[in-house]
Amino acid sequence: MIITIDGPAGAGKSLAARQLAKNLGFRFLDTGAMYRAVTLAGLRQKINWENTGELAKIAANLSIRLSDARVLLEDEDVTAAIRTFEVTTLTRHAADNLGVRERLVELQRAFAEGKNLVTEGRDQATVVFPKAEVKIYLTASDEVRAQRRYKDLLARGERVTLPEVLKKQMERDRRDLQREIGGLRKAENSIEVCTDRLTADEVVAKLEQLVRAAEK
Ligand code: DC
């Protein structure tokens, strides 16, 4: 069984998807982490970001492994390194790159082979797994999402301000929504859940309820 969770940054996808997978005994796939890992590889190799072929070539030859909680790039644990403000800002180059997208979609489908999976991203229901049994579209208001991201970055020791985070978030939203291939769209048969007034536990409980209902 495949459960997709798509939605904008800061809607609470990662936390909810990870916990949902745990409760159901499913595997978990964080596809944003894959776009981030490709970006980190590009950053380290000091590529020219305007040359899309360079990043696509890196993605084609890169070994990215995701265990449930860690991200390994060529066997190095980059779980924390892919979450910096710099990588977050640069990740648009990977997300906008068709060669990178093709390669990552291929890896995502291969990862799902023969597994029960909760997968989260932007295009999981629309492009990668259009036949998924349960499709969730997770949202939250701009302010709530920015607050969450801000707290998260502060906890990681980054020096950012809330207006700065909100501005970057709006830029990312615009890009995610406008991206022609793999852009953020609500699949026709997905269920929308707004997390503004829900605690993390309540979100997971709600999602679990939706999955159980679909299983019947
Ligand atoms: O979910 P996240 O913030 O870790 O995602 C990082 C970036 O990757 C985000 O700006 C959009 C992009 N992304 C994507 O284009 N497709 C996905 N399936 C997942 C993420």
Image (cartoon, helix red, strand yellow):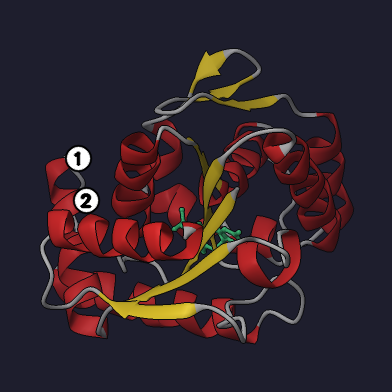
- The residues bearing labels 1 and 2 have C-alpha atoms spaced at a distance of 5 Å
Q: Tell me the element at label 2.
A: helix
Q: Tell me the element at label 1.
A: loop
- The residue tagged 2 is 153
Give, as a three-letter code, the residue at label 2.
Answer: Leu
Residue 149 visible (yes or no): no
Residue furthest top in the image: 75
The residue located at (72%, 64%) in the rendering is 131
Q: Position of residue 22 (x, y in %)?
A: 34, 35
Q: Is residue 62 above or below residue 191?
A: above
- State yes or no: Cβ of the residue under disc 2 lies below 8 Å from any atom of ligand 1: no
Of the pair 94 and 24, the residue shown nearer to us: 24
The residue located at (13%, 70%) in the rendering is 198
- The residue tagged 1 is 156
In this rendering, position of residue 153 left or right of residue 43: left
Q: Is residue 163 above or below residue 125?
A: below
In this rendering, position of residue 40 left or right of residue 164: right
Q: Is residue 144 above or below residue 88?
A: below
Residue 50: quadrant of the picture? bottom right
Q: Position of residue 165 (x, y in %)?
A: 26, 69
In this rendering, position of residue 19 left or right of residue 89: left
Residue 138: quadrant of the picture? bottom left
Q: Position of residue 163 (x, y in %)?
A: 19, 78
Give, as a three-letter code, the residue at label 1.
Answer: Arg
Residue 154 visible (yes or no): yes
Whether tag 1 and tag 2 are in contact, CB under 8 A, the answer is: yes
Residue furthest front in the image: 216
